[in-house]
Structure formats: structure tokens, C-alpha cells
Image (cartoon, helix red, strand yellow):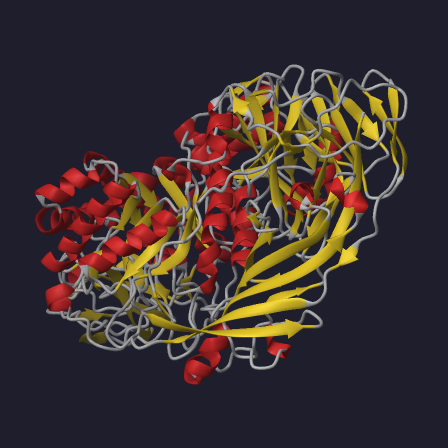
Amino acid sequence: MRDPHGEAPSQPLFQPSRRLFLGMGAATGAAVALQPVLGAAPALAGSGDIVDGFAAPARAAQAKFRWWWPHGFVDTAEIEREIDQVADAGFGGLEVADVHHSVTEDLDPENTGWGTPAWVGALEAALTRAEKRGVILDITIGPAWPAAVPTVTPQDKAAMRELAHGLAFVSGGEEFSAAVPEPVVEPAEGVTERTLTAVQVARLADGASTTKAPYALVADTVEEVTDRVEDDHLTWTPPDEGTWAVISYWERGSGQRPERGPHSSPLSYVVDHFGAAGTKAVTDFWEEAILNKRVRKLLKGKAGGALFEDSIEMETEATLWTPSMREDFERYTGYALMPYLPLAVRHDEDRVFSFDSVTDRRLTDDYNEVLSELYIEHHLKPLKKWAAKLGLQYRIQPYGLQTDAVSKAALVDIPEGESLGFKNLDDFRSLAGGRDLGGNTVLSSEAGAVNGGSYSTTWARTVRTISREYAAGVNQAVLHGFSYADAPGAQWPGFAAFTPYSGGIGYSESWGPRLPSWRHAADVSGFLARAQFLLRSGTSTADVAFLRQKGYAGSGFGAAYFSKDGVRAGWTHQFVSPRLLELTDPKVKKKRLAPDGPAYRLLVFEGDAFSGRVPTLPLETARRLLDYARDGLPIIVVGDWSVPESPGVDQGDSAELAEVVADLLAQPGVHRAPDREGIAAGIDALGVSPAVTYAKASPLLHAKRRDKKAELYYFANSSDTETVDHEVTISTDVKKAYPYSLDLWTGDIEPVAVHTAEEGKVTVRVRLAPGAATAIALADRKWVRNGHPKNARVSATDADTVLVADQGHVVRAAKAGTYTTTYDDGGTVSTEIAEVAEPVELTGWTLEVEDWRPGASTTETDISSVELSLDALKPWTELPDLADVSGLGRYTATVDLGEGWTGGFGAYLELGQVTDSFRVTVNGEALPPVDQLARRVDVGPYLRKGKNTVEVEVATTLINRMRVFRPDVYGSARRQECGLMGPVRLVPYGQAGL
């Protein structure tokens, strides 16, 4: 049988869910006999937007894909079909990106390249189909990245600029009469012009090397001699007998092109991101070449999403520059750059000259601060304003240089991080701080990319990665990615933007119908959509604002104590920067910073972690912190701040800074910890605690949102091996709060029967498999209609659990016995569960395999069937004829259940080890989506007396087939263990009403 790519999933996005409940009378103190299972409860009716929207979130809350096109070399019918595929699988958006790193044949950039009429026509078709299907389209600002256009050459002032230095040494007493030194760094291809902007001389420090950088210079000997240059020839004699450096500075285009071109004809070049001319070149090209009348109308319609810009990856071996740098530097810093210009010079990102370590650091900080300001002033703000006129939001990855990404995250509509490039969750928390103080809603992630993971990345791994990012503030996943079906030279299973990559296995993943696991994509998309829906509801809150002097992101730098120990105790934290506090001007009320926003309950800062923890702080920031302390915000100051210094070269306000910091340290709500190890003691001394606490250290992560009617808590187990099973105590402002569990896989909302509640606190038990996630809401009893019992709360039980049924509570246990349940008024009830069967391991499996192989064309798949009888479950790599097979496997087993199974008890189905995605059917009835990390599902409502049939459909990745189909690329990969490996067990439970 032949399976051409592009089939829509055969099952709906959100399958109807079922709830298990028992209809019982009022509970008494006497033992209650085992009662039968009566059926499914009616769906919960909600009184608020969260409840109403949770089961099937709207498109705007659904995850997206990066959509990689081989520029305009695309077919309209295929574009429409791929939008349908994404929509049918429950994903809400696509980001059109001109990316084709794997292509080895000419794509005809002149006729179909980025920005050509062919490309614009494809974009118009995509927007038209997206509007029809309710899919939201984002569009990258240029071909690949960084932002570039084909109307700019390296010779234009709008192109990205660099300052290339030349260097010569001359001994004292010897006349230098020669051409000024040529640039040390050769110009990039296409760079044909340069301008000599300055020539300086400086004496080397005594004993300084002339053969190895950085070259030590005597600061007060730097002199500009540009006026002595004629026709690029300098005549000059050193004033003393030391060794002198003659330094020339040449401005020229960097010649940088967007990644892996050519994307256009003429070639596109990266624009100046620090000057107005570069931004104007981008908007002018769009206005003239892309934004025809139809495209403009569509962008302002339902399909228009965001203008997207990737990370700021300026690649030059020289010094980043912009033509107005001299004037801009003095405008922002208050002093002239030229006496310190040697310290700004870079060769392949390394410092070339040095005065002394302190001055070097301070000048570098000032230079990077100016770059931040110029990027915001000339690039970010104008593009955001322009995008808004088009009906688009502006989404950017605001990192890549040593600039203030935290502040940029507050200024754009949607900041974005990435799974691959970010070193830890704190990189996301940096952007989350900017988003939340800036009053924005969404933090996006370029999600799930894996180096070397092409065709071997599982949905489970992707979900596990994104689940953790959600706990760090992310609430939009833009999956990496979805490749257009075909391109010249591509081989089965189709064009994949990032594989092969330099001849080897590339970056994952090319999701879509080319993968067997796409059959189950709707289950995953439902999980992602529900998590994102919750994490965009209400307002984000966090416990700690960790102030860093530099708002870098993507650095991997964490928060002292909180990143390692604090999160394991329940603390949540975000990062803020001095500029962010200035931009957003948050206030303190009732001991909370930004009470209507993240509502931080503690602020912590130390010396500059990026500069050896030097105690540096802007005077205005110190004054702001003093105001916070006086208004009651608890603050911990880490380290020795007896001699604080201002950032940058100008230290004119250091005396006043010292006074303000001393005043700050004297405030009663401020604790000085001598070092990082003293932070925990400082927390105790101040008497502050997180909103969520655990009795012992835990891998549990969480994020909190507060809504008008509820407080929402998203929990994720960050461990790959450790199961979370412990109580969680939550501080709450909800009066008479009642907890509800929100199932991110099925959309069910269930009251949490067993919990304790006192004024301002609720304690519940959280159980999560490694990598799994869940959500809990605290609200009043009217939040969900018919969703809670009218009798008292259950505070404790020695049974396995207590569930809420239609008219009361239900005790559930895996063993027979008498169980005691305690209500919150102190009353107890004894419940007898008379009989529970022993667990049953399912054996005697029949396996029907769909073997996916290359078809007659690049995008077609031949599927052949293989059927096996299995005495024991094993990975396909250990089964005859399946070692190199990829596809789908349907495992079927039957089990005979005795008299008690008629309703006396139910069972959980535990699947054990499974790779990759799976679905479960019991007695011909498809179960709702199953948690792909927990791999355990309640099948009680589906079982019956006598013969029962269990079917588990498992989809694999493609790597085992790719290994043998293209061994030159994928042969280095190990065979991936896949299939249902088990053990698979029915684990019974008994239950009875109270």
C-alpha cells in the first residue's frame, strides 16, 4: 500500500473524555461495601473563561511550527495542503522562514528567491489558506538570519558596519613615514570599499609584548594623528624612546550575508542593526517588493500573526560599528570615545589592546551599553511600530550579543528564547522578567531542536523539554520545525531544512506526515495547547527578582542560591536589569514589587557576575532600591559593598553611590549576606518564604498565574529518572480555596478530594512521573459547576486516594482492607474494600507492523505489513526482520477477567517502556489521549467480565530506516530501541463510596 505524505490525521484533535464516578449515598461512620462502577460523569460546566476554554483551546493558544521553505521554490497546492496538515493536527500557527541549509542544488534565487514575485505569490497563497483554516502565520523579517535585504551591498551605509584596525610598531627616535597600517582582518567577499576614520598612536607599557595581544598601552599617551595623514600616508616621530603603536581604524561593510544563502539575486546582505539606515532598508524593501494590496489585507486579517526576527548573530572578525558611533557614544555616556577607542577594538571577538583590567572592563561595559541603546532606538522600536501598522506583532530573539536582552524583552510584543541555544532554564527566566515587568503576555521558545537529532527525536523528548520551559515562563512553543515537502536534490522522506547538515546528521526535526509519529501529533498538540492556554491566563507571578547588572540572556548564568537550591525548595525567580527597572518603573505595595504584575516578594542582588562579582551599581538603580526598601520590600545584598563603584568609565558619582548603598544596607528589611552561601540564612532572617513550599528538596518546578477567579499552578517534574510524590503547600489569596486538578492531556478538570486547607494555605499531594506535568487551580466551589461534593473536605486517608464522585467521595486502594478517611472537621469514616485482584501482566501479543520505506518519489512512502506473534515484548531492534524498520506497530493482547471485574474493581494499564508515541484502545473503544511521559492510564470504565482486548498503537521515529536508506548520512547513528517494550500490566484497584 502506498501512503503519500500529507494525509490528515484520522482522529479528531480533542477526543471526548470520560470521568469515572460512583453514585452513592451520604457517607457514614460505618464501613461501606464495595459499589459498582456506574459510568461516566457529565462534563463539568464552567463559570469562567479558564474552565470553558481549557478542554479545546482556541488557535491562538496552540503551539506553532517554524515552516521552512526552499525560498519561493514552492507549489501553491502543496502550501495549502501543509497548512491543512498542521491545522488538522491541532497546531495553531506557522512561521514562514526561508531556510534551506541541506540543499545542494541551485534553487534559482533570481526567479524564486526570497522577496521575488514567486515568493510573494506563495506567501499570499499561504495567508489565504491560513485565514480559511484559522491558522496564524508569522513571517521572518528577511531570508534566514540576521535581517538582510537584496537592495543593500556592503558599500552602503545601511549595511552592517565594522571597524577594522591596522597596527604597526615603531621605536622611539625612529620616524614613521609610511602608508597607514592595513587592516589586520581581511575584508569579507563583496566588500570593496573602506574609509579611514582615524589614526592613533600610543606608547606600549614597559615590557609589553609586541607579538601577542592584548597589547598593553599607556592610557594617557593615546593621541589622534589623523590630521597628519595625507593620501593614507602618515609621517610621525615618537616623542620618547619607548615602543609605540600606530593604530589605524578603517570603517567598511562587514559583508555578512544571511545564513546559508544565496537566498536572493542580487545577494542579500545583513543590515546595520544599530543605525536608522539599516532599518529603513528593511522596511523600504518590504513596502516595495512584498506588501502588495492583497498581502496587506491578509496580514491585517485573522491570519496575520507576528513579524519574526531571529537572534542577533553578527559575525565579524573585526569590531562592530555604526557610522554614528562616535557621536552616539558621547551622547549616551557623556564622554568621548576616541581616547578609549583602542579598548573597543576586537579581533575575532578578542580584545586587542589594554590599558588596565579595570579600565578595559569599564569601557567594554559602556560600549556594549551603547550598542544596546542603539539597537533599541534604531532597530527594535521602529520595527515594532512599523509591524503594528501592518497589523502584526513583533517577535524577536533579543540575544546574541552582549546587550540588554532583558530590557528588550519588555519592549517587544513577544520575546523568544530557544531550547537549543539556551544553556539552562535561567536563560528563559531572564526574558520572563522583562516580559512580566513590561506588561507583555507571551514568552516564546524556538522549541525542541536537537543537534544530530534529525529523524530520531521523539515526541516524548520534545514534550519533556518544553514542559520544563513552561515552568520557567515560556507559554508559546514554536517547534523546530516543519519542512516544506520537496526541493531540488532532496531525497526521501522529503526536503528537510537542516539535514543533511555539512554532510552529516543535522538538527531535528522535520515534523509532519513524513513521520510515523505524526499519527499521534494531535494528542501532543492538545497537551501543548492546554498548557499554553493556562499559562497565558491571568497574570504571571514569581517570588524573587534577581537583579543583574547586565541584562544578558543565553549566557547560562544563574541566580546565586535560587537556581540550584531555591528551586528545589519551591522558590521561583526571574531576572531584572537596571535598565528594565528604569523602563518599567515598578512600585512596591504591601511588600510586593510590581503588585499588579509579577508581585515579587524578595529582591536579591550581588556583584556583577559577568565581571568577577565587582560591586557595581548605577546610582539611579541604588536610589530605586533604597526606595523599595523604605516601602517595605525585603532585599538581600550579597557580598562586600563597602566600596561600591558605578558602572562604566565615568566614576564621578561613586561617592554619592557609596552613601546611598550604605543607607540601603541600614534599612531594617535589608539583609547583607557575606557571600552566596549566606543567602539561605538571609531568607530566614527576613522571614520570607516562597508561595509554594515542599517538605524536602524536590525536582518539581512550577509557574504561577493569578486570575480574577482562580490561582493557577503549573507543575513539571524536571527529573528524567526521579518520580515526584509529595505534598505541596500553596499560599493563596483565594478565600475558602478549593483545589482542582487540570489534566493537560485530556482536558478534564477534577476536584482534588484529599487536601488540607487553612486560612491562606492549601496543601495537596502532587504525583508526577519523570518529565511529566500537571496543573492545579485554587478557586472557590463555584468555579466549576457540579464539580465538587457538597459535604466536607477530606483532609487525610490511609487509602491510596479519594476521588470526588457524583454525590460524594470514593475511596480507592490497590489492596483489600479497611481504610480510614478523615474529614477536615475531624470526623472519620471507615471504608471496607473486600477484594482486589492481583496485577496481571499481559502476554501473548500479536504485533502488526506498518513498515515505512522510500516510495516512487521523494515525498511518497511505501508501506508493507508484517505480522508477528510475540511471546515476550522486546524492542524492534531485537525482533526478527524489524531491526531496521520504522513505522507503526499495533500490539494486541487479550486477557480474561474474572467475576470481580464486573464492577467490583477497575484497573490501571501500565505500559512500561514505549518509544515513541502511542495510543490505547480497550475492547474496541479508543481511550482519550494518554500522558506520554507517565504511560499509565485508568482503564476501569472500559473493562468487562470475561475476555478483554487491549490494543496499543505505537509510532516510531524514522532513524532506523534512514540508517540503511542513507548510510552515508545516518549510518553513524545507533539503532533506536522502539516499539512497546513493557512490561505491560493491569494493576487493579478496589473502590467504595464513603
Q: x, y (%) of residue 780?
A: 62, 17
Q: x, y (%) of residue 738?
A: 66, 22
Q: Residue at x 60, y 48 (%)?
A: 931
Q: Compared to 557, does 502 lie above or below?
A: below
Residue 152 or residue 898, whichever sits in front: 898
Q: In the rendered view, does 6 fall on the left or right side of 441?
A: left
Q: Quadrant of the C terminus?
A: top right
Q: Compared to 950, does 994 lie above or below?
A: above
Q: Residue at x 53, y 47 (%)?
A: 469
Q: In the rendered view, does 773 fall on the left or right side of 294?
A: right
Residue 475 or residue 376, whichever sits in front: 475
The quadrant where residue 316 appears:
bottom left
- Using the rendered image of the protein, determine whether residue 304 is visible from the camera's viewpoint: yes
- Using the rendered image of the protein, determine whether residue 912 is visible from the camera's viewpoint: no
Residue 700 or residue 901, whichever sits in front: 901
Q: In the rendered view, does 317 fall on the left or right side of 249?
A: right
The quadrant where residue 190 appears:
bottom left
Q: x, y (%) of residue 878?
A: 64, 78
Q: x, y (%) of residue 716?
A: 62, 44
Residue 221 or residue 295, whichever sits in front: 295
Q: Quadrant of the N terminus?
A: bottom left
Looking at this view, name the residue that lies furthest to the bottom: 968
The quadrant where residue 97 appears:
bottom left
Q: Compared to 444, does 217 lie above or below?
A: below
